[in-house]
Image (spheres, rainbow, N blue to C red):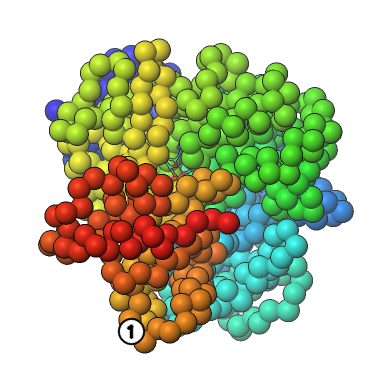
């Protein structure tokens, strides 16, 4: 049955939406359902999200800091932009885009380091109705090219190079590689950052510096319909090809703005620091739009947690008097390694609220974060959501909901989760474990996979007809608290980054001497999950060390450094069913050291291989 909104839900969402600025009020609150995967919100409404993020604050907050920028190198001066200045910067950038022929509905890709121009740039797109697509700088040129082709982007905006710890990422050079013979890209815009030498192609490549000088200081915000596209963001799924999730304007704005305020209990003059990269949904929703919609001050950090020392996060908290720190379990674990003596040296008196996102947070990391960073006086909210959900759906409200390590806790108001059993039926018992679904629509749900609505339906709405399926497993306790147990599909979560095992396998299989491969998640003390690859070579291979190195290099080349396998085991064969299907489940058990739970292997095509694989299994040193 299509599940429709209850009266309470309808009242709630209309009330929330009224706190935003509309050019024309919506006619219908919500249409469509999960059967048809045609959900729409605030239908008939008109607005511009940047008017809500910027213009409406100008009267009261013109001089207030909107953005604080902390550079990679602590010796470089930090800078800030007030709401007044951010408004002008966005207008200028928007005019620059218009001057380069970008129109409403065109796709503009960003492949940049974390500097203010990235945030200004995506807001500039939203100002004129161009669809932005941010690709994380850790993806390879080949991955970037795939995303540019898929989205048919007209323009790409990059840096000459990006600072990342003690490394420099040659972003412009990577763009050059990515767009060889790519006709759709008409303009490459280069923001200077590292001042390294780069090549510029006449008539295609332009410096931002040079063009911004001619841009007018005011740009009217274009009128957008509620359901006009706002951005595309690529994420991995269980097949090889990344999916471009499309988010639209009004629904995204309403839920992201409201959830920011509620979950973090944001108060005027708080300083909010989300450490994610804008290349991920967290950076879109809770570094950019959530804070700006609320007139907050948001901190953007260009660098990494361990540069120049593992005290950097705590130094930045004190330097900018951060009140809210929102980061990922993997970052916490990577700092935990250096000992609690480091955060203990910092009082971090400004801190009020801590947040966690991206993967289940283990008790040890939760307690460490709560004790040594939050000094046991800051509520720690574990926020569960996805690229697809646009904003947080299950989380404690800081200081209001009781805290329990390992629990994302309760759904936000208006959100209705459900757990499904193996027969595909919703479990009505309160205490239960099952696959996590959402029963009713919420405003910031992605509307489609760009260019492939069929895949959108297949991926999210067919497993449990009438429900949105998240791909996660969860447990619900007697107090209604949810504990997210992790992915139940072929997706792994490496340092909070989502990767499809099929994507990594496809990359490995490109090697001439590989017959086939199977990739599974490996429990990893810092990354949460690492990548364990089983590879079957041809007879030509004599030097397996050399092969392993080549495979690692190949995966980095095809996908990017985030997908580099941690362990590679060369095997003669993979366990298969009689119909030839690779039994990844068995490999997963072996890697998770659950050998006694492998189950019956006698029906396999090649049962003997399991023993051999176990004997030659590798471990993290
Ligand atoms: C997947 C979504 C949410 C923005 C960053 C990641 C996992 C996310 C939690 C959490 C347990 C979590 C899920 C989800 N996940 N937050 N608090 N507890 N798991 O977005 O790349 O779209 O990944 O991350 O498995 O499905 P994403």
Question: What is the x, y in percent for residue 198?
Answer: 68, 79
Q: Is residue 621 above or below residue 144?
A: above
The quadrant of the image that shows the N terminus is: top left
Question: What is the x, y in percent for residue 157?
Answer: 58, 65
Question: What is the x, y in percent for residue 314?
Answer: 77, 38
Q: Is residue 568 above or below residue 545?
A: above
The quadrant of the image that shows the C terminus is: bottom right
Q: Quadrant of ligand 1?
A: top left
- The residue indicated by pointer 1 is 539
Q: Is residue 342 above or below residue 8?
A: below
Q: Residue at x 59, y 50 (%)?
A: 277
SS state under label 1: loop
Q: Residue at x 78, y 26 (%)?
A: 350
Question: What is the x, y in percent for residue 43?
Answer: 32, 34
Task: Locate residue 189 relative to residue 491 in the image: left or right.
Answer: right
Front-most of 102 and 493? 493
Front-most of 366 and 562? 366
Q: Is residue 553 visible?
A: yes
Q: Dot 1, crowdedness within 10 Å: few (<14), some or many (≥20)?
A: few
Front-most of 224 and 261? 261
Task: Decide if ligand 1 comes within 8 Å of the CB at mark 1.
Answer: no
Q: Residue furthest bottom?
A: 540
Q: Residue at x 49, y 40 (%)?
A: 359
Quadrant of residue 353 within the rendered picture: top right
Task: Locate residue 289 relative to residue 535 in the image: left or right.
Answer: right
Task: Locate residue 196 relative to residue 597 in the image: left or right.
Answer: right
């Amino acid at each position: 049955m299509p599940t429709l909104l209850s009266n309470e839900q309808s009242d709630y969402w209309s009330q929330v939406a009224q706190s935003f600025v509309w050019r024309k009020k919506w006619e219908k609150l919500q249409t469509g359902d999960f059967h048809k995967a045609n959900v729409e919100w605030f239908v008939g409404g008109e607005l511009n999200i940047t008017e809500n993020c910027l213009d409406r604050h100008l009267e009261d907050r013109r001089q207030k800091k909107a953005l604080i920028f902390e550079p990679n190198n602590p010796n470089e001066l930090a800078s800030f932009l007030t709401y007044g200045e951010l408004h002008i910067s966005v207008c200028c950038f928007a005019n620059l885009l218009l001057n380069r022929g970008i129109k409403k509905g065109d796709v503009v890709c960003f492949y940049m380091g974390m500097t203010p121009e990235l945030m200004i740039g995506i807001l500039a797109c939203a100002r004129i109705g161009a669809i932005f697509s941010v690709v994380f700088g850790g993806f390879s040129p080949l991955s970037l090219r795939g995303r540019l082709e898929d989205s048919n982007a007209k323009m790409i905006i990059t840096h000459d190079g990006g600072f990342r710890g003690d490394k420099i990422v040659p972003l412009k050079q990577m763009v050059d590689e990515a767009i060889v013979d790519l006709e759709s890209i008409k303009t490459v815009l280069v923001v200077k950052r590292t001042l390294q030498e780069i090549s510029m192609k006449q008539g295609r490549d332009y410096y931002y510096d040079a063009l911004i000088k001619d841009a007018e200081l005011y740009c009217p915000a274009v009128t957008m319909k509620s359901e006009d596209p706002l951005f595309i963001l690529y994420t991995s799924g269980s097949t090889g090809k990344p999916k471009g999730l499309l988010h639209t304007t009004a629904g995204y704005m309403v839920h992201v703005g409201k959830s920011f305020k509620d979950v973090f209990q944001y108060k005027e003059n708080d300083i909010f620091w989300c450490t994610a990269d804008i290349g991920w949904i967290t950076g879109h929703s809770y570094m950019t739009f959530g804070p700006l919609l609320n007139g907050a001050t948001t901190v953007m950090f260009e660098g990494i947690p361990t540069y120049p020392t593992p005290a950097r996060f705590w130094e930045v908290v004190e330097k900018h008097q951060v009140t809210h720190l929102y980061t990922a379990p993997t970052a916490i674990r990577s700092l935990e390694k250096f000992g609690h003596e480091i955060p203990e040296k910092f009082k971090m008196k400004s801190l009020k609220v801590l947040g966690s996102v991206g993967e289940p947070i283990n008790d040890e990391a939760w307690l460490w974060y709560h004790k040594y960073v939050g000094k046991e006086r800051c509520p720690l909210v574990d926020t569960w959501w996805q690229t697809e959900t646009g904003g947080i759906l299950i989380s404690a409200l800081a200081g209001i909901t009781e805290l329990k390590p390992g629990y994302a806790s309760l759904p936000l108001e208006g959100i209705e989760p459900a757990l499904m059993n193996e027969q595909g039926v919703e479990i009505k018992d309160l205490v239960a474990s099952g696959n996590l679904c959402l029963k009713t629509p919420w405003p910031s749900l992605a509307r489609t996979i760009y260019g492939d609505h069929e895949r959108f339906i297949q991926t999210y709405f067919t497993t449990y007809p009438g429900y949105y399926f998240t791909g996660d497993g969860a447990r619900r306790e007697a107090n209604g608290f949810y504990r997210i147990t992790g992915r139940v599909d072929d997706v792994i979560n490496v340092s909070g980054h989502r990767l499809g095992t099929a994507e990594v396998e496809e990359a490995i299989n490109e090697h001439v001497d590989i017959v086939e491969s199977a990739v599974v998640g490996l429990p990893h003390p810092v990354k949460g999950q690492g990548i364990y690859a089983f590879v079957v070579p041809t007879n030509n291979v004599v030097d397996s060390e050399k092969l392993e190195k080549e495979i690692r290099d190949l995966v980095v080349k095809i996908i990017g450094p985030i997908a580099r396998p941690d362990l590679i085991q060369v095997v003669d064969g993979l366990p298969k069913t009689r119909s030839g299907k690779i039994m990844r489940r068995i490999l997963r058990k072996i890697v998770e050291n659950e050998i006694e739970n492998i189950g019956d292997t006698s029906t396999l095509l090649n049962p003997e291989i399991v023993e051999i694989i176990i004997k030659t299994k590798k471990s993290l040193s």
